[in-house]
Amino acid sequence: MTFLNFFISGISLGSIYAIIALGYTMVYGIAKMLNFAHGDVIMVGAYVCFYATSRYGLNPFLGIVIAMIICTLLGIIVERLAYKPLRQAPSLAVLITAIGMSYFLQNTALLLWSSNPKVFPSIIGRGAFKLFDGELSISHITALTIGACLVIMAVLTLFISKTKMGKAMRACSEDKGAAQLMGINVNATISMTFAIGSGLAAVAGALLCSAYPTLMPTTGSLPGIKAFTAAVFGGIGSIPGAFLGGLMLGVIEIFAKAYISSQLSDAVVFGVLIVVLLVKPAGLLGKMTQEKV
């Protein structure tokens, strides 16, 4: 049962990576931008949820809703101020701007909330489901995380495939110029993409800090990098790829910590990524595209 416990822990951690990776992969798939400030939006969402529940005594799930609203607005503001003026700019300019926005959010968090670690309260309690006479233990937060990831994936897939805005997103992903000629508001579509990704980041921040309770202004940095790795692993721009990449990354990381070394687990994760990209440069579910030069 030890193996199964590790596997479930990996699926739980991978579910958080998958939710975060959805934000990366949607923004890249539609706007062709790498939003490296996404990890810091996770941190903002976690802090908002923390203060809503700890200081103001609100229900944890109401705290998550408030965090989603604030992070959604933050995502729209960041896109309008930092990324919209760079629609036609070289990729390097966008990358530098994204890194600058990341540092701006981190340092603003330091000014507002200080660098002192805070203990994040569990949003669903610290209990666990006991199976097979207690040999298999699944914590409530683990079950909630996995369930939330599956629900988010299902809803997002239906949204992309069935709604008018989802079809507009797919059209912009294929060809923004042609989509604009067909009457699609490209700017509004990209803003909606940032809004959805940032709202999901708030959910991921609350789940992440509930499972790993230490909260600091750098909370989202490493999970954000790993989630970006998961998006590349699965095929950046692909929503099923982000889901698959996140789950696989979480399982690999937990097994590496358990059977190899907790200090070498990150090296194992990135080593697997390198091997996968050598075999499939576009990722597991990504598609190779040809560009005219």
Image: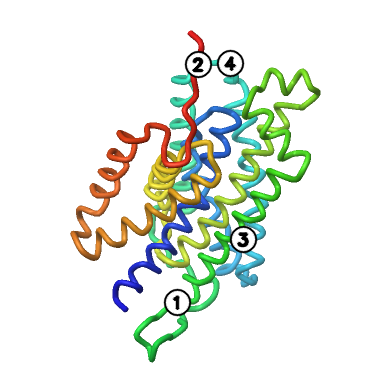
Residue at the far right in the pictured view: 183
| Viewer can see residue 41 | yes
Q: Earlier in the sequence, mark 4 or mark 2?
A: 4
Number of the label disc, if any, that sits on residue 209: none
Q: Are marks 4 and 3 in contact (CB under 8 Å)?
A: no
Q: Earlier in the sequence, mark 1 or mark 3?
A: 1
Q: Earlier in the sequence, mark 2 or mark 1?
A: 1
Foreground tag (4 vs 2) = 2
Q: Give the class, few, some or many, for how many residues have Cα within 10 Å of label 1's Cα (few <14, many ≥20).
A: many
Compare residues 248 and 97 and report the one nearer the observer: 248
Foreground tag (3 vs 2) = 2
* Residue type for callout 2: Glu
Whole-percent x, y for residue 37 in the image: 49, 38
The residue under label 1 is: 139
- Mark 2 and mark 1: Cα distance apart in space: 48 Å
Foreground tag (2 vs 1) = 2
In the image: residue 132, left or right of residue 173: left
Foreground tag (4 vs 3) = 3
Whole-percent x, y for residue 20 in the image: 50, 49
Number of the label disc, if any, that sits on residue 88: 4
The residue under label 3 is: 151
* Residue type for callout 3: Val
